[in-house]
Image (tube, rainbow, N blue to C red):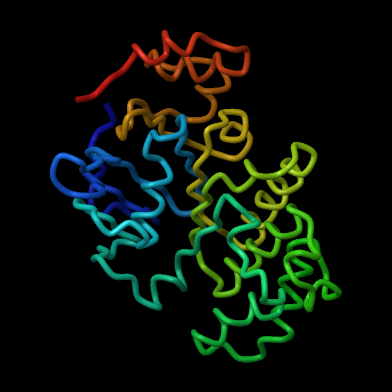
Amino acid sequence: MPASPETGAAGIALLIAHLDVRFGTGEGAVHAVRDTSFTVRRGESFGLVGESGSGKSTVLRAIAGLARGWTGRIAVDGKDLGPNRTKAFYETVQMVFQDPYGSLHPRHTVDRTLSEPAKIHGIKDIGPRVEALLRDVGLGPEFRFRYPHQLSGGQRQRVAIARALMLEPRILLLDEPTSALDVSVQAEILNLLQRLKREHGLTYILVSHDLAVIAHMCDRLAVMNAGRIVEEMDVEQLRRSEPQHNYTRQLLNASLGYDRETADTLLTFD
């Protein structure tokens, strides 16, 4: 099991310590995340990987303030977060969601989608910034007044990424950003994210069930199962196929096909 992260460490963009997330109360409560701890350094790409239901997306939602029933510690740039998120938080941290079809308002143009966060936060000269961001994500100003139904899935996700960058955040939370896209488009979006990270000096926390995506995008990763982190490693260990935990080995074998019944018996928590 990974050690609890130290507090106040220099160069740490995000600190998670003993995070627990529960949904509901009583016998029907779901304990989605259990005693999870990790740190993400500034400028790093950190991956959370695991099967559906492992708790990885719930960690992102707790950071973003979308999952309220959490305990433990979440700190951004050394500042502890409470249950509510401030404007200053959203100027530092933004999230890109999995479904580009559901994350954009169907009756809002691209211009309105990108402009609204800027208006809320008092940013001036919005029009030129909208056009610059559209160029930055590979669309261009001709997309500015289109509606989501006039865009492909990949184009919608580019708009969602541009929206996340409108407030010039330092940290992006990426929740399966390519899993809803065609295979032919996935690599384009991943390469776009890599370029934007370099050009904007971003820190990424990337959730995925796909170890190939994690290996392509991340410097380090944590493997989650049943709400817990079972192993942390750097991406070179992953590429050398050197996991220590049986569950991680099963994930590595997934691309070749594996026995789900065997995987289900590897780790079970009460």
Q: Which quadrant of the figure has residue 64? A: bottom left
Residue in front for this viewpoint, 217 or 60? 60
Q: Residue furthest front?
A: 28
Residue at point 57% right, 82% down? 118
- Left or right: where does residue 97 sit relative to residue 224? right
Q: Nearer the viewer, residue 19 or 28?
A: 28
Q: Compared to 142, does 23 lie above or below?
A: above
Q: Quadrant of the N terminus?
A: top left
Q: How many marks?
A: 0
Side (left or right) of 211 relative to 107 = left
- Residue 222 at x, y = what percent? 41, 33
- 168 sits to left or right of 270: right
Up the image or down, 182 lies above or below 163; here it is above
Q: Is residue 38 above or below residue 70?
A: above
- Residue 89 location (% of width, % of height): 39, 71
Q: Residue at (27%, 59%) from the top-left corner? A: 68
Q: Is residue 167 above or below residue 137?
A: below
Give the image location of residue 73, x and y in percent.
22, 53
Toward the right, the furthest residue is: 142
